[in-house]
């Protein structure tokens, strides 16, 4: 059973969130906790306070995490050629177990179709 707690932003399908939960990942959508209009900074702060990893397809988060100089929250950025929920879910279920230790410690993980890049936080 995973200890990872994920905070999925609005671009992540509710189907993916449900699938992650069914596989033992404690996953909530940002819109369950914040208004749909919440700023990226508010989402990062919520994740930091709640001990959650931000799951997104929005590249703005990478810049904000890098500029913040914090060790948390960890971030998973998806750069997949398909945003279909089944494709996204399959890729996450494939990759998450191998990057869980880094995400727990504080990392920015970028998942593309053919690679996974892990950078420790804070990014210098």
Image (tube, rainbow, N blue to C red):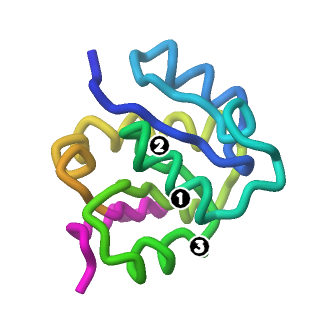
SS at badge 2: helix
Binning the other alpha carbons within 10 Å of mark 2 as few (below 14), some (14 to 19) or many (20 upward) gives some
Q: Which residues are magenta?
A: 108-124
Quadrant in which the N terminus appears: top left
Question: As drawn, is 114 to the left or to the right of 31?
Answer: left
Q: Nearer the viewer, mark 3 or mark 1?
A: 3
Q: Position of residue 15 (x, y in %)?
A: 70, 26
Q: Does the residue at mark 2 contact the one at mark 1 (Cβ under 8 Å)? A: yes
Q: Mark 3 to mark 1: distance in Å?
A: 9 Å
Binning the other alpha carbons within 10 Å of mark 1 as few (below 14), some (14 to 19) or many (20 upward) gives many
Q: Position of residue 57 (x, y in %)?
A: 62, 60
User: Which residue in the structure is indicated by mark 1?
Assistant: 78
Residue that appears at 45% across and 40% down: 92
- 104 shown above or below 21: below
- Quarter where residue 115 is shown: bottom left
Q: Nearer the viewer, mark 2 or mark 1?
A: 1
- 66 shown above or below 32: below
Residue that appears at 55% across and 35% down: 89
SS at badge 3: loop
User: Which residue in the structure is indicated by mark 2?
Assistant: 91
Question: As drawn, is 3 to the left or to the right of 114?
Answer: left
Q: Mark 2 to mark 3: distance in Å?
A: 18 Å
Earlier along the polypeptide chain: callout 2 or callout 1?
1
Residue that appears at 40% across and 32% down: 5
Q: Mark 2 to mark 1: distance in Å?
A: 9 Å
User: Which residue in the structure is indicated by mark 3?
Assistant: 59
């Amino acid at each position: 059973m995973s200890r990872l707690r994920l905070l999925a932003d609005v671009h992540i399908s509710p189907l993916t969130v449900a699938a992650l939960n069914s596989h033992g990942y404690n996953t909530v959508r940002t819109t369950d906790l914040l208004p749909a209009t919440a700023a990226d900074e508010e989402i990062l702060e919520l994740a930091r306070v709640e001990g959650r990893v931000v799951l997104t397809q929005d590249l703005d988060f990478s810049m904000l995490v890098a500029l913040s100089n914090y060790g948390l929250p960890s971030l998973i950025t998806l750069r997949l050629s398909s945003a279909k929920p089944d494709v996204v879910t399959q890729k996450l279920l494939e990759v998450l177990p191998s990057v869980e230790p880094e995400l727990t410690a504080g990392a920015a993980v970028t998942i593309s179709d053919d690679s996974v890049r892990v950078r420790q936080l804070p990014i210098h």
